[in-house]
Image (spheres, grey):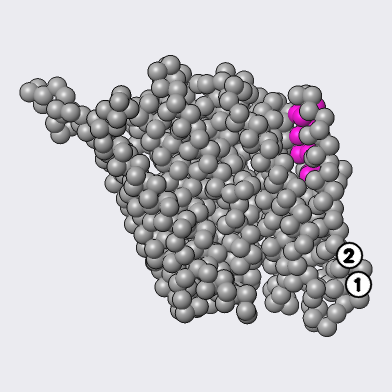
Amino acid sequence: MATLTSLFDHYDYAITIFLMMAGLYIVVARGNMVKKLVGLSIFQTSVYLLYIEPAKILGGTAPIIDPAFTVYSNPLPHVLILTAIVVGVATLALGLALVVRINEAYGTVEEDEIIEKDRES
Amino acid sequence: MNAVVNGIWTNLPVLQVVIPLLGALLVGFLRRAPLAFAITLAVSWVLPFIAGALLTQVLTGGPISYHIGGWAPPWGIEYRVDALNGFVLLLVSVVGAVTMPYALRSIAREIDEDKRAWFYCMYLLCVSGLLGIAVTGDAFNAFVFLEISSLSSYVLIALGRDRRALLAAFQYLVMGTIGATFYIIGVGLLYLLTGTLNMVDIAARLAPAMVAHSPAVYAALAFITVGISLKLALFPLHAWLPNAYAYAPSWATAFLAATATKVAIYLLIRYYFSIFGIAIDLDALPVNDIIIVLSVAAMFIASLVAVFESDLKRMLAYSSVAQIGYITLGIGIANQAGLTGGLVHIVNHALMKAALFLAVGAVFYRIGTVRLSELAGIGRKMPLTMTAFTVAGFGLLGTPGTSGFISKWYLAIGALDKGWWVLVFLIVASSLIAVVYIGRVLEVIWLREPGPAVAQASDPPLSMLLPMLLLAAATIYFGINTEWTAGIADTAAKALIGGLR
């Protein structure tokens, strides 16, 4: 019961972990390279949530110092994740560019078919 | 004038990263291959001087703490250089500088003219990322540099001529991104526990956090270990490595094999000995046992696979996985001699593996193939190249008189200090497998009559010959004079072990 309550109280973490596992599963289980990249993106996005969620302090306001407020949200994780998003976009772009080149070279983006073609040649 | 010199001298840590970064931008804008090579060569030759100056400062005056933008740590990003990462900085810059002249002709042979400038651009980005990982004292900054170096190395690999290079780069991208994301999950957990990203600060604040949240600390340790292990190709997370090294352009293989995995190993050592080791008792956890078991598995299984490889580049790639096993074995033994052995093998393996891959690249430059079956008698046609290969190959075996012997000697002493006789036996036994795969190549290249494929072969031009002869000479030199390698590694290991809880 205590576990359930804690899970309910921290439902946002449950979502994060679900996304993390779902993303990783897609990367491992799918042979289609575009789908693999989708899984990879979901996996990376779940980490953005992992950073952002604890940064929001209940009742906290934007981190601009003002005598009227005493509780602020933590701005650092947001900035870190801004950087991580850029990294994620770059990775996805490079991954998709490689998939385009692979499609030109092999005529398919299914991993098993590509391995089959390499074995023939 | 004095002010300028002083300004350069005090800003060396950041110049180490900024110079190749700006060089990459310049090359990216100019896009003319000859000009790109000239800039890259100039940058590559400047970097060892910076790294050398840093290491000298550290060895005489203790660790350097550099505050980016004047923001004091732990608020600002700190670049922190001590004996360990000064050593790694020097290794990466020296390998880049020594091998760079080789790139001119090798790259001209293997990459189309319109893509050459981009190749150099990606190389400079990669160097700047690798040096950044080594120099930074900030956990998140290390992630950013890790991704800079990884993304550029995916491109370097994808520029290989064979279409399988694209597939290898894609697989490396998927594995590498999973590794980096695992690492960042671990760093996130550490940040939640301690509220800081500065490595020294994390280490200080982790011990109090252990009291209430030990499962979270263990989770962070696990995520970081797996994440970095993917990057350094610790067995069995090495699946991306053989194809990536086999199909990348020859010069890129030599550079990446010598530096990329080594910098990841440095990061793992940093986390084990400067962060987790200070805060928690690692001996109470099975961390070292797991590392030792996986290292021994790498030494044997990867070496055995190498014995049956017919493609020289793939054979050397599997041999790299095995040699990384020796380095991580030193980390797992975790005493003074063992860690010294691991650290010194980072340098020794980098130099000899670069020499081996460069020699194989020279073969490809002349006859367009590196399949062992077609290389019969090539030693008589390319004697100097194959001498470099042979010397570095003997280093790989750990023959006395070469640098590989020094590494294995320290590792064996470390294992003996712990009373692990079996491990000493395993180190020797796995070296015997290396005797088989290197010996098999030596037999083909020296003892057989030259076949039709190698009839027209001859030693490559001096710009390609000199780097590999230099590296092969270093394999012998560091086997006799160990002051620069084992001496500095010993100092670094002492500092790391001394900080352990």
- Chain to which the residue tagged by mark 2 belongs: B
Please, what is the dominant secondary structure of the magenta stretch?
helix
Hey, which quadrant is residue B1 in on the image? Answer: top left
Whether residue B121 appears in this view of the structure is no
Name the image quarter holding residue B496. top right
Helix, strand or loop for disc 2: helix
Residue identifier under label 2? B443
Query: Mark 2, residues whose alpha carbon is within 10 Å: few (<14), some, or many (≥20)?
Result: few
Residue B448's disc is 1
Label 1: few (<14), some or many (≥20) within 10 Å?
Answer: some
Q: Are marks 2 and 1 in contact (CB under 8 Å)?
A: yes
Counting residues from the start of the chain, the first of labels 2 and 1 encountered is 2
Identity of the residue drawn at 44% across and 56% down = A27
Task: Residue at 48% x, 38% y: name it.
Answer: B223
Q: Nearer the viewer, residue A36 or B431?
A: A36
- For the record, the magenta segment spans B402-416
